[in-house]
Image: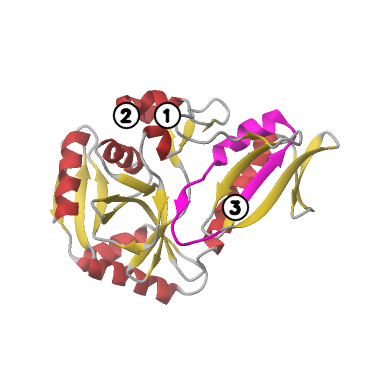
Amino acid sequence: MPGVADQGGTGSGEFEVTALTLTRRFRFRTPDPCVFDRLRYLDCRPEIAGLSQSDVTVSIEPFDGRFRIFSGGLPIKDVIDAGEALDFLHVHLFTSSIEDRPAASVLHAACLRRDGRRLLLTGSKGTGKSTLALRLVHAGYEIEGDEHVFVDGATVIARPRACRIREASLPHLAEMADAISQAPYFSSFGAERIFNVDPRALGAPWRIEQGPVDAVVALHPNHGGYSSIRPMRPSSLVQFLMSETGWRNTGRGLSVANLAALAGRAKAFDLSLGEHASAIRCVDLAIKS
């Protein structure tokens, strides 16, 4: 992967993949090259400002015709094959990431910066959020994450995770398609590939830091049409953000307060997302307003 330090052998006959959360550095180790090839999909090594990570070693070892997963030297799961190992560790990594910020709201949003100003793109799956985020990267934006942000009062921090891009999106990302297609990918039962793309492979920096949000853009699909943008009232934004927030079992009142604080500080816009050239112009107007 261009511009990204290689993952691979540890010098002890094992392969290693590293994935960061805000507080932990997971080192997934295995002697099995097929398991390693699957686990590369979890590769996640951004620069995270102001935070340090403790090391957690997770080993995936052949065991009785299957694989046994160890964490801290203790067995935590037996799996049938490399695919099941990936499925389990993907969920394990996500759960561990959420544990990093137990009091924060978890918002489904891409997080980008330009000229010191922070932008959130939020919308339901299938809206085109990740594709637009990478189009903005090509236009000069810096990306922090394309899936989740933790909302803590009026500030946010992206959940560390490389950008996930579906194979079907490559025609909309022609300038980046070659680099994206070289990234690790996941494909289940012949379905399309989903690539795990480190932004640095696209020539962009990847630095995550906590800070305020200047603009929030709520996305609604207008596939095949033009893109247009209009201001939103803070109350409408809160309602929209609530529909894109993962609710914890406790602390829902605090979560609503976090979203209200975010909406009270940031300027809000509704974007009908159609073709990308006009969408980028719309987002430029939002972040500069």
Query: Looking at the rendered structure, which numbered label has been put on residue 155?
Result: none
Q: Residue 204 location in percent, x, y?
A: 35, 39
Residues in magenta, as a range:
25-52
Query: Looking at the rendered structure, which numbered label has been put on residue 25?
Result: 3
Q: Is residue 286 magenta?
A: no
* Horizontal relation, residue 224 to residue 86: left or right: left
Q: Is residue 47 magenta?
A: yes
* Secondary structure at numbered mark 2: helix
Amino acid tagged 1? Ile
Amino acid tagged 3? Arg
**In front: mark 2 or mark 3?**
3
Q: Earlier in the sequence, mark 2 or mark 1?
A: 2
**In front: mark 3 or mark 1?**
3
Q: Residue 220 location in percent, x, y?
A: 25, 47
Crowd tier of the residue under label 1, counting other residues whose Cα lies within 10 Å: few below 14, some 14–19, many 20 or above: many
Mark 2 lies on residue? 173
* Secondary structure at numbered mark 1: helix
Q: Residue placed at 23% from the left, 51% from the top?
A: 115
Residue 249 drawn above or below residue 285? below
* Secondary structure at numbered mark 3: strand
Q: Total number of numbered labels?
A: 3
Crowd tier of the residue under label 2, counting other residues whose Cα lies within 10 Å: few below 14, some 14–19, many 20 or above: some
Q: Earlier in the sequence, mark 2 or mark 3?
A: 3
* Horizontal relation, residue 248 to residue 63: left or right: left
Mark 1 lies on residue? 180
Q: Residue 83 location in percent, x, y?
A: 65, 35
Q: Residue placed at 39% from the left, 28% from the top?
A: 168
Crowd tier of the residue under label 3, counting other residues whose Cα lies within 10 Å: few below 14, some 14–19, many 20 or above: some
